[in-house]
Image (tube, rainbow, N blue to C red):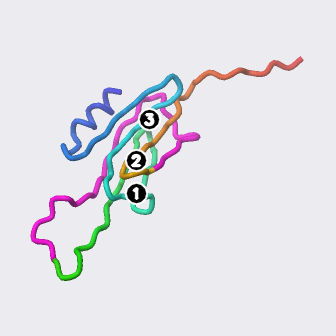
């Protein structure tokens, strides 16, 4: 998990990420205010969780931006623990919070015995 922690330290201070662990899964929670399922992409490749999210916003009629500090474009590569797998992984966005759950490999399951 050291690689994951190092990657979190390199993210901008405005990006909030939590990593949770249970006996059989990891859960990554990322604040992505204003992003939706349509403007967010999550994928796992070569042990890396890649999150790209953007917020779309328009200036109200008659207004234009002079300063924009609330822009959101998140492009983060987070190295996963070696026992995390994308098989049966899930992701959801609710209220500007992205939650990705990745099962652990080798979770141990009962093996049926024939004979």
| Nearer to us in this view, 86 or 35 | 35
Q: CA distance from mark 2 to mark 3?
A: 10 Å
Which element carries disc 1, helix, strand or loop? strand
Q: Residue at x 33, y 33 (%)?
A: 4
Q: Which residues are magenta?
A: 64-92
| Nearer to us in this view, 59 or 75 | 59
Which residue sits furthest left? 66
- Which mark, by number, is residue 10? none
Q: Residue at x 22, y 36 (%)?
A: 9
Q: Residue at x 31, y 31 (%)?
A: 3
- Residue tagged by mark 1? 40
- Which mark, by number, is residue 98? 2
Q: Assess whether residue 23 is covered by the magenta stretch.
A: no
| Dot 2 crowding, Cα within 10 Å, few <14, some 14–19, many 20+ | many
Q: Residue at x 22, y 60 (%)?
A: 71
Q: CA distance from mark 2 to mark 1?
A: 9 Å
Which of the image's four quarters has the C terminus?
top right
Q: Are marks 2 and 1 in contact (CB under 8 Å)?
A: yes
Q: At which x and y percent is residue 65? A: 14, 72
Q: Are marks 2 and 3 in contact (CB under 8 Å)?
A: no
Mark 2 or 1: the one toward you: 2
Which element carries disc 2, helix, strand or loop? strand
């Amino acid at each position: 998990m050291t690689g994951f922690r190092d990657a979190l330290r390199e993210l901008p201070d405005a990006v909030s990420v939590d990593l949770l662990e249970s006996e059989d899964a990891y859960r990554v929670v990322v604040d992505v205010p204003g992003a939706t399922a349509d403007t967010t992409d999550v994928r796992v490749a070569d042990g890396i969780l890649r999150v790209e999210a953007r917020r779309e916003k328009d200036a109200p009629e008659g207004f234009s931006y002079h300063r924009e500090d609330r822009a959101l474009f998140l492009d983060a590569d987070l190295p996963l623990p070696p026992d995390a797998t994308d098989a049966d992984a899930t992701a959801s966005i609710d209220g500007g919070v992205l939650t990705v759950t990745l099962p652990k490999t080798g979770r141990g399951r009962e093996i049926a015995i024939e004979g």
